[in-house]
Amino acid sequence: MRWLPSILAVLLVVPRYAGDERLPTIGDFPVVRAEPYVPKGGWPQRIGALVPVGGVTLHSYDAAFGGFSALAIREGRALLLNDGGNVLSLALRKGTVVDPRGHVLPDGPGIGWHRRDRDSESLALDPTTGTVWVSFETDNEIWRYSPDLTRPAGQARPEEMRNWEVNQGAESLVRLRDGRFVAIAERKPDRRTRHMLLFSGDPIDSRTRVTPLRLRVPLRYHPSDAAELPNGDLLVLLRRFQYPFRFTAKLLRVPRAALRRGADVEGQVIATLAPPIIGENAEGLTVTREGKRTMLWIVTDNDGMPWRPTYLLKFALAD
């Protein structure tokens, strides 16, 4: 019976969207509550290059709540996207959720019935126009949407992404301030590198040039999201699953100058998040500025398991 623990562990991380049943859709006004989160033993003063600011766990009885894979902060509101095409927008005021609103992406790959049709894994924003781009991992497509994510405005399946692994492909997408985009695959081509693409502009525009790169990662860690720092460096969120049921995460800082043609892109690990601080599936990352301070926000994916909370954590980047 040695195989039984392994089978149980696999079943625990299979999202509820698996199978032929129609994926759940979030309500327009879901009831969401927040609870303060402090790890056992309290927050340390530093976690590598991170200074903990605080955190909450988010909870809801909405059937489509959770499974968040992407995060953005704009106009004082958190924008969360899960891997079933569900969008949740909310504000936090003194630890209380204010005005939560939900809707479903209006279009995407396939017909939208199955999870594989709406396996939305990352989002990128243009802060000037508000335009949003979403990457879909199973089909390795990128879609562009209106600022409120209610209207599609184009889509592409880049030739360079066609051979990326199904369900292990376009996991991360980030728009750089100079208008370029970076996409990163979750897995392949080997144990220590991941497919990475540098787009000269909008990935939907057929005139955009695409430069293939390879990102070097720590052994057994996989990219789950990325964000640009104020100086132009790229911050990549990496996560690792370990049996029987434990996650750890690392933050990899990649110098802007490393993003060049033909390069094996390397970075430096600046922080590791592990129990007792947190042992959950860190999936979404975004960066904001508060005065002269750079803030990092991380959201976790509960893999569609309602008994696992969603963590929303905030850190300051140490000077």
Image (cartoon, helix red, strand yellow):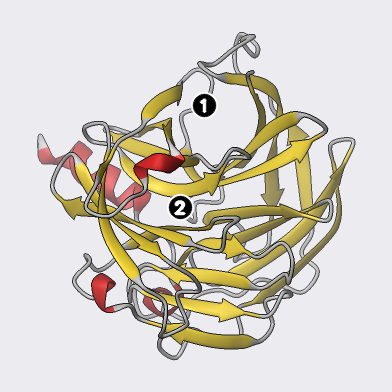
Image coordinates for residue 145, horizontal then vertical, percent: 62, 79
Residue on which the image places disc 2: 303
Residue on which the image places disc 1: 278
Viewer-nearest residue: 55 or 253: 253
Q: Amino acid at mark 1?
A: Ile
Figure label count: 2
Helix, strand or loop for disc 1: loop
At horizontal 41% and vertical 77% (from top left) the residue drawn is 208
- Horizontally, residue 155 falls left or right of residue 132, namely left
Image coordinates for residue 55, horizontal then vertical, percent: 70, 31
Image coordinates for residue 118, horizontal then vertical, percent: 46, 76
Residue found at the very far bottom of the displayed protein: 111
Viewer-nearest residue: 167 or 24: 167
317 in relation to 47, above or below: below
- How far apart are labels 1 and 2 at the CA level? 16 Å
Q: Amino acid at mark 2?
A: Asp
| Dot placed on the residue nearer the N-terminal end, 1 or 2 | 1
| Observer able to see residue 234 | yes
Quadrant of the image occupied by residue 104:
bottom right
